[in-house]
Image (tube, rainbow, N blue to C red):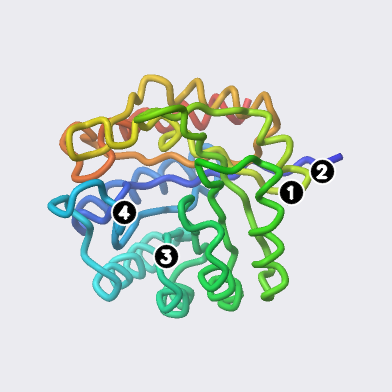
Amino acid sequence: MTLHMQPLFIAGPCVIESQELLNTVAEEIVRINAKLGTDIIFKASFDKANRTSIHSFRGPGLDKGLQMLADVKERYGLRVLTDIHESYQAEPVGEVCDVLQIPAFLCRQTDLLVAAAKTGKTVNIKKAQFLSGMDMRYPVEKAMEAGAKEVWLTERGNMYGYNNLVVDFRNIADMLDITPRVVMDCTHSVQRPGAGGGKTSGDRRFVPSMALAAKAFGANGYFFEVHPDPDHALSDGPNMLFLDKLEGLVEKLLE
């Protein structure tokens, strides 16, 4: 039986678009933390290396992106998470970020998992869209045997034919048998990959339902990509939550 854990929240824009955007989101997270007594972890990507089109915006890159994330951490006192795509990125990212995230498509990449584990920081491994919850035992083993102090698993749906994802919420219970912290990615799970004509589409209407269903199945962490104006975001806009909706949803999940 999994021990009760306080709910964990991760929130932020999909990609670093500007320092202004990071500050806007960080200020709102600080306000919510103060009001609700939460410790929401700030997330943003310095490079979206797996965009659908070569013409899509990717972000500021490793060096500038880490400087911007370090500024958020220092200015606002927030814990910070970002994802890595190549092994060499783990060490510099570990010097800034509290949590290193492994993208779903890369969750079986041994060298990437080992490099993340060796930083000594928490490693959040997203479940691949082609794996079951039980299959995630092996990526966790790789990270733990490489020295990871703490590993989380994140559910983000499975491919359902072309251009669509579905969530089998039983995966949450299966992954809780592997690691005590299981996060529901409530925004990527409503994606429709590649269905936007050269970019990924999605439907943010279902984000609250994904979160509440995951809670019913025992999830103890929730991941939200948020933006003040997602319809004009440079990445993943259709599935991002409006920033001003974050507080109400977090409050509901704390009930």
Amino acid on which disc 4 is placed: Asn
**Distance from Cα at disc 2 to Cα at disc 1:** 7 Å
- Which residue is labeled 3 in the image? 84
Mark 2: few, some, or many residues within 10 Å (few <14, many ≥20)?
few
Q: Residue at x 50, y 48 (%)?
A: 40
Callout in the foreground (1, 4)? 4
- Which residue is labeled 4 in the image? 50
Mark 1: few, some, or many residues within 10 Å (few <14, many ≥20)?
some
Instruction: Work out whether 72 lies above or below 251.
Output: below
**Distance from Cα at disc 4 to Cα at disc 2:** 36 Å
Callout in the foreground (1, 3)? 3
* Residue at the far right in the pictured view: 1
Identify the mark at residue 180; answer none if there is no mark. Answer: 1
**Distance from Cα at disc 2 to Cα at disc 3:** 30 Å
Question: Label 2 near label 4: C-beta < 8 Å?
Answer: no
Amino acid on which disc 2 is placed: Leu
Mark toward the start of the polypeptide (1 vs 3): 3
Mark toward the start of the polypeptide (4 vs 2): 2
Amino acid on which disc 3 is placed: Ile
Amino acid on which disc 1 is placed: Pro
Q: Where is residue 154 in the image (x, y as percent from the top left)?
A: 57, 45
Q: Residue at x 41, y 35 (%)?
A: 187
Mark toward the start of the polypeptide (3 vs 4): 4
